Image (tube, rainbow, N blue to C red):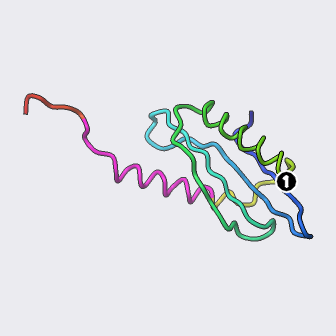
Amino acid sequence: MSRSLCLTRQCLGMVTRIECVVLPLAGGNGLWTLICAAGLSGEQPTAIKAQGPFCGPLVAEGVLAGIADNLIVHGYCECCDLPIWRLHIQAQLRQLNGERRRNFGDYQFHPET
């Protein structure tokens, strides 16, 4: 399974687009996320959602495959166009990494203190 996917669906003369990418989270701890952007093709995305964190890329890719299978059942087709919302997805990843840094603390048990 690829770590990125673009799906489109044509309805009433408009093309709806969904771009999904599996990316590693910062920290080097093996956690990955799946970020999807959706909206009308040729416009700015109207929704950006993240799923995860997942323990490893294979788990995240499995979730991506499940989402793709579901969307194909609902009339979406895989397209080979270049990603157009990569900057929006990268911004979401930076936000997720920033939230994780702010919430990172010392959670070790120190019985000697």
Q: Position of residue 77 (x, y in %)?
A: 87, 49
- Along the line of sight, which residue is nearer the eye, 107 or 12? 12
Q: Position of residue 110 (x, y in %)?
A: 15, 31
Residue ranking furthest to the left:
113
Query: Mark 1 highlights which residue?
Result: 81
- Along the line of sight, which residue is nearer the eye, 39 or 12? 12
Say above or below: 38 vs 53: below
Indicate the quadrant where residue 59 lies: top right
28 falls in the magenta region: no
The quadrant of the picture occupied by the C terminus is: top left
Q: Position of residue 94 (x, y in %)?
A: 51, 55
The three-letter amino acid code for the residue at tag 1 is: Asp
Please provide the residue range marked out in magenta. 89-107
Residue drawn 71% across the image and 44% down it:
67
The quadrant of the picture occupied by the N terminus is: top right
Residue drawn 76% across the image and 44% down it:
70
Residue drawn 33% across the image and 46% down it:
104
Residue drawn 89% across the image and 65% down it:
11
